[in-house]
Image: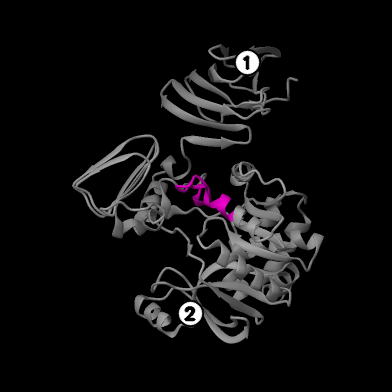
Amino acid sequence: MVAVILSGGAGTRLWPVSREQYPKPFMKLPDGQSLLQKAFLRAARVGARQVLTVTGQEYYFSTANEYQTLGLPEVQTSYVIEPLRRNTAPAIAMAALWIAQQNPDEVMLVLSADHLILREEAFAQAVAQAKTIAQQDFLVTFGIQPTYPATNFGYIEQGLPLQDGAYRVARFVEKPDRQTAEAYLLTGRYHWNAGIFCFKASAYLDALQRLQSQMYEAVLACWQGSEQGDVTYLDAALFKPVPSESVDYAVMEKAEQVVVVPADLGWSDLGSWDAAAQMVPPDDSGNRVFGEAVLLETTNTFVQTEDRVVAVIGASDLVIVDTRDALLVARRDKVQDVKKVVEQLTQSKNDTVRRHRTIQRPWGSYVTLEETHGFKIRRVVVKPGQALSNHLHHHRSEHWTVLRGTAQVWLDGKVQMLRHGESASALAGVAHQLLNPGLLELVLIEVQTGEYLGEDDVRRLGSPV
């Protein structure tokens, strides 16, 4: 069985932690793991020895780093990189084509990168059952046992029994109103649609070709025109005409051989800050704190903070999320409106919807500590054995001071080694490259000076080595 992890959603309701370049799958939970890491571990626990991730170019390096830090070399990792977002039906089709090259009848388990499952043993049992059914050419979906009349989830109605607690799907229904959702719960026949699937690669491709021929042909043309490998970058021009559609609407709602496996998994899509707050144990006043905070005469309030102490006095029923460059304060019954905040920030072109101050790169990361006209200060971390590209800037100079580790600096073709407390500078127009030759992380402070400090002021050059 190959596990397919779909990782591309923005998660705008979890701003300011979830952002365009650092979406919900990368959010760290109180146990230190991200939702993406949990999805990977979940796949490994149910027997997948290969994980294929479908994601965007902007997330590839961060995704690979998340997996690498888990230390599971026995699980092979591969990637399909989408140049644009085209929803789940094409993403799963690309994964199915990748898997079908090895074995068309291989069973694929499709997971979302940003969901949480607390009952791992129940999930493993449901997957084992789904795998057996999928081997009989059924398209299997997982139905979550509802615990309240949710109006923000789609539902699956079970039909005739198939085997061992699995049922044929009678129908998929859209997000209902409150009264309809309450009626669904009373029948016992309806389950939340969690977007978890299990089927043969060939079964999905056959269904897609039969039900969505235009999408199938476009996906196939893009696949055949892309350079394939362990990291497959889909051709942007060929991918653009692919229709954007969810797998539920394109395939599952129209196919005949569809089966639902009901399961009580402790599942959550963490679709709001109120849901995320449930991951933190409450104190005697119902307050939940992730980070460092002082709460006085305060009840039923969630606080998440990164670098600062947050103090709350005489409040109740609030959500407070503090990051380095943005602060959210909302009533708990209004957290769904965070999406509206993101929409307004997007319209005003505010950069806090796109990125955090800490930026991940293949070679490491950097965080902007201070920036104003004429200068910028960054803390730069370079992984062992990694290097920045050889380049120059036309409008700015850079000065580095090593805080930890050893730096190998190429300045206009000349090399020098820098250790703790030592510095070097690259003036505007001078070619330079920074490398970490050591076994430990290289940490340094970078000071940029100049009239223009934009990220587009860079000219890439060939390696000086």
Point out residue 404 in the picture as x, y percentages from the top left corner: 55, 20
Residue found farthest to the right: 102
Residue that label 2 marks:
190
Q: Residue at x 39, y 37 (%)?
A: 325
In this rendering, does residue 279 appear at all?
Answer: yes
Residue that label 1 marks:
430
The quadrant of the image that shows the N terminus is: bottom right
Seen from the viewer's position, the closer of residues 322 and 288 is 288
Q: Residue at x 44, y 40 (%)?
A: 351
Span of residues in magenta: 23-39
Query: Is 29 covered by the magenta stretch?
Result: yes
State the CA–CA distance, disc 2 to disc 1: 66 Å
Point out residue 296 in the picture as x, y percentages from the top left corner: 21, 44
Q: Residue at x 65, y 28 (%)?
A: 384
Answer with mark 2 or mark 1, whichever residue precedes in sequence: 2
The quadrant of the image that shows the C terminus is: top right
Secondary structure beneath dot 1 equals loop
Image vertical order of residue 330 relative to residue 215, above or below: above
